[in-house]
Amino acid sequence: MELVKEVYKLTESFPKTEVYGISNQLRRASVSVISNIAEGFSRKSIKENTQFVSIAFGSTSELETQLLLAKELSFSHASNFDKAEKLLLEVRKMLNSLFSKLKSKY
């Protein structure tokens, strides 16, 4: 949730011409991460849960790429990306750990 909030906060400073561009893509990718985690935990099997954790991890890669692009295009000051990038790294580590633990159960 913290990552999503940070992405929303960050994208508010992007150029208004990007409202329907990368701002929207960043927001959608960040929401996708937590949505897939939530959906996975609501599933009845560990295998399905693992699949949704994997999809969430894929969304973190999408988010990482979009953050890098927005940073390179100078849509906001480079230091404004720091917190989102740190949170993204933390989420990726947690998802890796969760995936490994779930995978070992089946």
Image: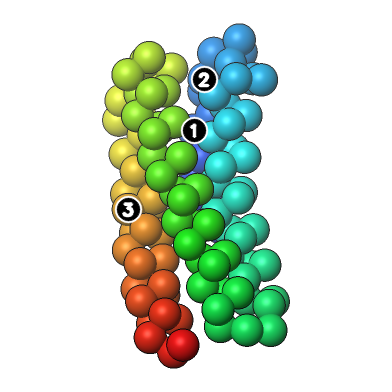
- Which of the two discs, 2 and 3, sits closer to the camera? 3
Return the x and y of residue 37 as percentages of the image width and height: 58, 65
| Residue identified by numbered label 2 | 14
Q: Is residue 97 left or right of residue 66?
A: left
At label 3, counting other C-alpha atoms closer than 10 Å, the crowd grade (few under 14, some 14-19, many 20 or more) is some
Q: Using the numbered discs, state the Cα–Cα distance from disc 3 to disc 1 in whole angstroms.
A: 16 Å
Foreground: 91 or 8?
91
- Looking at the rendered structure, the kind of residue marked 1 is Leu
62 shown above or below 68: below
| Residue identified by numbered label 3 | 89
| Residue identified by numbered label 1 | 10
Q: Is residue 26 left or right of residue 61?
A: right
- Looking at the rendered structure, the kind of residue marked 2 is Phe
- Which of the two discs, 3 and 1, sits closer to the camera? 3
At label 2, counting other C-alpha atoms closer than 10 Å, the crowd grade (few under 14, some 14-19, many 20 or more) is some
Q: Using the numbered discs, state the Cα–Cα distance from disc 2 to disc 3 in whole angstroms.
A: 22 Å
Residue visible at 51% across and 40% down in the picture: 7
Which of pointers 2 and 3 lies earlier in the amino acid sequence? Answer: 2
Which of pointers 3 and 1 lies earlier in the amino acid sequence? Answer: 1
Return the x and y of residue 81 as percentages of the image width and height: 36, 34
Foreground: 103 or 6?
103
Residue visible at 38% across and 52% down in the picture: 87
Note whether residue 45 is visible: yes
Q: Are marks 2 and 1 in contact (CB under 8 Å)?
A: yes
Specify the quadrant that holds the N terminus. Answer: bottom right
Residue visible at 54% across and 67% down in the picture: 51
Q: How is the image coloured?
A: rainbow
47 shown above or below 27: below
Note whether residue 9 is visible: no
At label 1, counting other C-alpha atoms closer than 10 Å, the crowd grade (few under 14, some 14-19, many 20 or more) is many
Query: Which secondary structure, mark 2?
Result: loop
